[in-house]
Image (tube, rainbow, N blue to C red):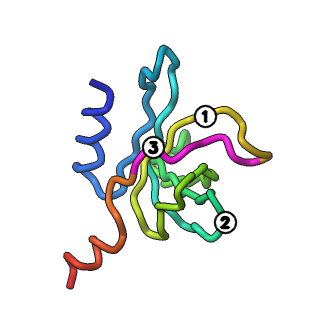
Amino acid sequence: MAETKAKKAAKAAPKAKVAEAIEVKGLHRRVLVGIVTSSKMQKTCVVRVERQVRDGMYGKYLTKANKFKAHDEENRAKEGDLVAIVESRPLSKDKRWALQKIIRSASSEMLTKA
């Protein structure tokens, strides 16, 4: 059921903001959706996740972004891809996320625009 919510959220908006707990082998792991900004490292990609936060004083919605390093075993993710990453055990000093799936590839997006 949690995966269907993530799929619906990803289809609803191109920059889907999903942060929900899912059940994976009895573990609760967060899933985030973001855009790959760098895939130059071996088995690692940098994913930019955006979220909207309401300002406490003025009530205006601000867009804030965080960058996460995610483990990509087969180096499948390319720059511009929309991906889902899942929380994992610490793999290095900065890597605490793993690539779950590629929701939309950047190359297919370019083909549809042309």
Mark 2 sits on what residue?
Answer: 41
Q: Is residue 98 magenta?
A: yes
Kindly give the residue lying farthest to the bottom in the view shown.
114
Q: Position of residue 60 (x, y in %)?
A: 45, 49
Query: Relative to residue 73, is residue 77 drawn left or right?
Result: left
Query: Relative to residue 111, is residue 98 drawn left or right?
Result: right
**Please, what is the three-letter code of the amino acid marked with disc 3?**
Gln
- Name the residue nearer the viewer: 107 or 76: 76
Q: Name the image quarter holding the C terminus.
A: bottom left
Q: Is residue 43 above or below residue 40?
A: above
Q: Position of residue 21 (x, y in %)?
A: 45, 25
Is there any visible trace of residue 35 in the rendered image? yes
Mark 3 sits on what residue?
Answer: 100
**Please, what is the three-letter code of the amino acid marked with disc 1?**
Ser
Kindly give the residue lying farthest to the top in the view shown.
26
The earlier-in-sequence mark between 3 and 2 is 2
Is there any visible trace of residue 59 in the rendered image? no
**Residue at 43 percent of width and 47 percent of height:** 84
Q: Position of residue 70 (x, y in %)?
A: 60, 50
Q: CA distance from mark 2 to mark 1?
A: 19 Å
Task: Point out the stretch of residues depicted in magenta.
Answer: 94-101
**Residue at 52 percent of width and 18 percent of height:** 27
Mark 1 sits on what residue?
Answer: 88
**Residue at 42 percent of width and 25 percent of height:** 22
Q: Name the image quarter holding the N terminus.
A: top left
**Please, what is the three-letter code of the amino acid marked with disc 2?**
Met
Badge 1 local density, few (<14 within 10 Å), some, or many (20+)? some
